[in-house]
């Protein structure tokens, strides 16, 4: 009999440990780079609000790599990612997020978007949270054709705050 035909038990265990280590390392790298890409898209995941002496609030946002202002917040207690869009008349919400936030669909309307004309439904957001800034009864549109989780934060919300852009920052402030 040849000794080559015998496999040592430690060799199989070592190969298994190598495969497990490789898979674990690949998983950790995936998590790291996924988080890095998310921070590049949304550098304002935990926006810090400063209280002003007059009782108001100020929120400073950093521009992302694409030149947009993106931030985390919530709609009626439901987490949301906002893309600030001064060209949008209303706040525009994907239908799936509107359902989770229990927003009521109102009248159907036609709206012009970058992808053409779509049917949207009117709604009102009871509370919209941007850091410590809370907006109430914000006019919005539910867009069933919108994919993803990003909400367009249009002028129906932005007109309730002051905003100033300087270099790569946008400051939102709300007076009492």
Image (cartoon, rainbow, N blue to C red):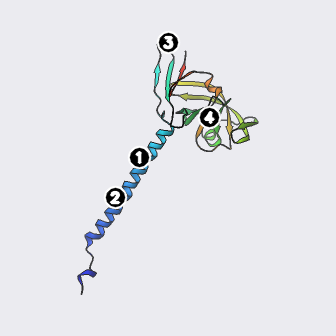
Q: CA distance from mark 2 to mark 4?
A: 42 Å
Among the 4 quarters of the image, the one containing residue 82: top right
State which tag comes first along the sequence, 2 or 1: 2
Q: Quadrant of the N terminus?
A: bottom left
Residue at which label 4 appears: 152
For this view, does 48 lie left or right of residue 154? left
* Residue at x-position 47% and y-position 39%: 39
Residue at which label 1 appears: 32
| Residue 84 location (% of width, % of height) | 58, 31
Q: Quadrant of the C terminus?
A: top right
Residue at which label 3 appears: 54
State which tag comes first along the sequence, 2 or 4: 2
* Residue at x-position 58% and y-position 39%: 150
Residue at which label 2 appears: 21
Q: CA distance from mark 2 to mark 1?
A: 16 Å
For this view, does 172 lie left or right of residue 4? right
Q: Is residue 84 above or below residue 26?
A: above
Q: Please identify the residue farthest to the bottom as the structure is shown.
A: 1
Of 80 and 31, nearer the camera is: 31
SS under mark 2: helix
Q: CA distance from mark 3 to mark 4?
A: 30 Å
* Residue at x-position 50% and y-position 19%: 57
Cβ–Cβ under 8 Å for marks 2 and 4: no
Of 56 and 83, nearer the camera is: 83
* Residue at x-position 27% and y-position 76%: 7
């Amino acid at each position: 009999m040849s000794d080559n035909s015998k496999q040592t038990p430690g060799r199989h265990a070592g190969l298994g440990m190598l495969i497990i280590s490789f898979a674990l390392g690949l998983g950790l790298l995936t998590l790291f780079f996924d988080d890095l890409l998310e921070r590049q898209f949304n550098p304002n995941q935990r926006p810090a609000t400063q209280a002003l002496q007059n009782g108001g609030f100020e929120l400073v946002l950093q521009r992302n790599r694409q030149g947009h202002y993106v931030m985390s917040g919530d709609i009626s207690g439901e987490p949301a990612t906002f893309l600030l869009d001064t060209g949008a008349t209303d706040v525009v919400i994907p239908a799936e997020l509107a359902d989770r936030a229990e927003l009521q669909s109102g009248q159907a309307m036609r709206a012009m978007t970058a992808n053409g004309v779509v049917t949207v439904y009117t709604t009102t957001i009871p509370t919209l949270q941007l850091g410590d800034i809370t907006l109430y009864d914000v006019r919005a549109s539910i867009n069933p054709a919108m994919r993803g989780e990003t909400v367009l934060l249009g002028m129906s919300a932005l007109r309730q705050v002051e905003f100033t852009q300087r270099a790569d920052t946008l400051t939102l402030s709300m007076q009492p």
